[in-house]
Image: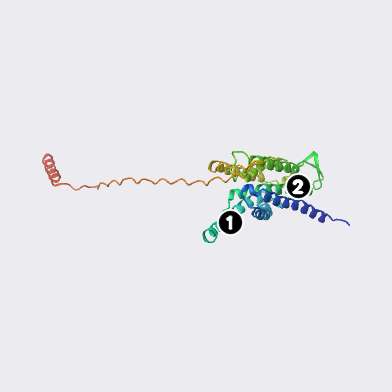
Amino acid sequence: MTISMEMFSFLQYAVTYGSGIVAAIIVNAFQAPLYRVSRRRAAVYTILMISLGLYGATLGAKVYNLFQTARGQNADFNIAIYGTIFTVIITMTVSVLIEKAVRKRIQQTRNPDLPQVSLRNTMDMLEPGAFILVFATKARCALGGCCHGIPCSWGVFSTHLRTTVFPVQLVEMAVTTSILIVVFFLKRRPFFRRGMAIFLAGGMFSFGRFFLEYLMYYVPEDRTYLGIFTFWQCASILVFATCVATLIYLYKTQPADPLPKRGEPLPDPPPPKEPTPKKKRQKKPKIPKKPLFEKQTVSQKKYAKGWQSTKKKYKK
């Protein structure tokens, strides 16, 4: 029995993406209680994240192809990882906010004991699975030979370019693995605030991708520059700035809530922050407005009349 190249390519997709999807669902569901999220809800949101991520990858590629077409360049991009990042963060945030509104309505009408959900805990719970999928995507690139590195005298042989290239896909896999390990330990440090995990990982990924762009291979006439940086380097700067700004905001506004270390019990959630009462503005006492022309008394009128007559005498 012979296997065609199309069948072999399909098997590569099935093995890499299928294993990544299964691993993401299992990991997110297993560690969901650490983020005060039920395992069923974690699995449902992970499946939703995967579906949105696949759609976002193609959507990001379409945006880039439109940009290239407007500049008169070839447009043949199929997927874009930054399309996935923006789509997943925006749509998952909207999904959780809708769920919060629905649960609040149910609490008011039917079941007052229904627990409320947290956007920050949900996003933290999704972080490991999201970057496991990024790892699977880069593994597929390495096996399929796409997303080439620059040609060099050493590296891996590219069947598309027919030469040895820098193994940039393997470097991205190593970077993704390092991000998962580093964020795993940062989440247990005293400075950690709930909601930081996905932005810590996104900031590190975009920082690394900015420099990896110098090692990516593009056909010279299809390499898109915006000033001195490529299109994807500008996207990296945008993602990095957004992640840093969000981390600073969370650090300044939220209480410290690190994950428990191994063997420690799950701590109680911190008490909700009481809203600071607004200071009532003291009304300034109204000062009566002085009329432009005050009414003259009888004596003032006589004095003014006498002065006018004296003035006339002196003029004569």
Q: Is residue 65 visible?
A: no
What colour-coding does the image apply? Answer: rainbow
At 59% across and 48% down in the image, what residue appears?
120
Image height of 38 relative to 309, above or below: below
Furthest-bottom residue in this view: 110
- Is residue 111 rendered to the left or right of residue 76? left
Amino acid marked by disc 2:
Ala
- Quadrant where the N terminus sits is bottom right
The kind of secondary structure element at disc 1 is helix
| Mark 2, other Cα within 10 Å: few <14 / some 14–19 / many ≥20 | many
Percent coordinates x, y for residue 286 in the rendering = 30, 47
At 62% across and 53% down in the image, what residue appears?
92
Percent coordinates x, y for residue 179 in the rendering = 68, 42
At 67% across and 50% down in the image, what residue appears?
28
| Residue nearer the viewer, 259 or 137 | 259
Which quarter of the picture shows residue 54?
bottom right
Percent coordinates x, y for residue 297 in the rendering = 15, 46
Amino acid marked by disc 1:
Glu
| Mark 1, other Cα within 10 Å: few <14 / some 14–19 / many ≥20 | some
The kind of secondary structure element at disc 2 is helix
Total numbered badges shown on the rendered structure: 2
Percent coordinates x, y for residue 178 in the rendering = 70, 40
The residue singled out by tag 2 in the image is 139
The residue singled out by tag 1 in the image is 99
Furthest-right residue in this view: 1
- Is residue 312 rendered to the left or right of residue 61? left
